[in-house]
Image (cartoon, rainbow, N blue to C red):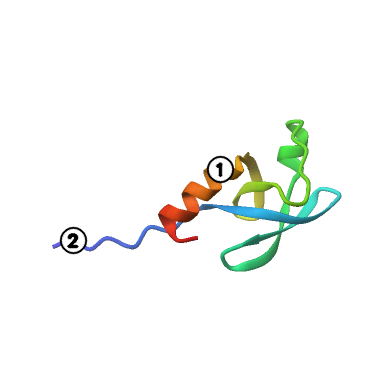
Amino acid sequence: MSRQAPLAALTEPARVVRTYGETAEVEDVEGITSVWLRPMLAAGDHVRPGDWVLTALGVAVAALDPDDVRVFAVQHRF
C-alpha cells in the first residue's frame, strides 16, 4: 500500500496591506508577511494596498481579481 504525502500549496492569495519600494506587506491565512514585488513591477503591474496578489515563496507573482479570491475563499474556507 502506498502512502501519499499531503499536498502543500506553493502559491496562495494575499491582500496587500502596505507597499514600500519593491516590497509589500501582505496578509494571508497565516498573518502578515513581506513579499518581493519586483517581478510584478518589472512586468508593468501596479500594486496598491487593498489589491490581491498570488504569492509564491515570498514573491508576489500575479495580480488576482477580487471576485476570483472570493470564490477561492468559499471553496477553501479561506
Q: Residue furthest bottom?
A: 31
In the image, taking residue 54 as reference, residue 4 lies left or right, namely left
Residue kind at label 1, given as amino acid type: Asp
The residue under label 2 is which amino acid type?
Answer: Ser
> At x 45% / y 61%, what residue is drawn?
77
Q: Residues within 10 Å of mark 1 (few under 14, many from 20)?
A: few
Residue lying at the far top in this picture: please name it.
44
Residue 42 position, x and y percent, is 77, 34
Near-viewer residue (21 or 14): 14
Residue 69 in percent (x, y) is at: 55, 48
Disc 2 target residue: 2
User: Which of the two labelled residues, at mark 1 and mark 2, occupies the earlier sequence position?
Assistant: 2
Q: Which label is found at residue 76?
A: none
How many labels were placed on the picture?
Answer: 2
The answer to whether residue 56 is above or below residue 30 is: above
* Residue that mark 1 sits on: 67
> In terms of secondary structure, where does tag 2 sit?
loop
Cα–Cα span, label 1 and label 2: 39 Å
Secondary element at image label 1: helix
Extreme residue toward the left, this view: 1
Asked if residue 50 is positioned above or below residue 28 in the image, the reply reads above
Q: Do the residues labelled 1 and 2 touch (CB within 8 Å)?
A: no
Q: Is residue 13 left or right of residue 4?
A: right
The quadrant where residue 8 appears: bottom left
Q: In which quarter of the image is residue 40?
A: top right
Question: What residue do we see at 86% from left, 49% from top?
Answer: 21
Residue 74 drawn at (x, y percent):
45, 54
Q: Which residue is drawn at 77% across and 54% down?
A: 24
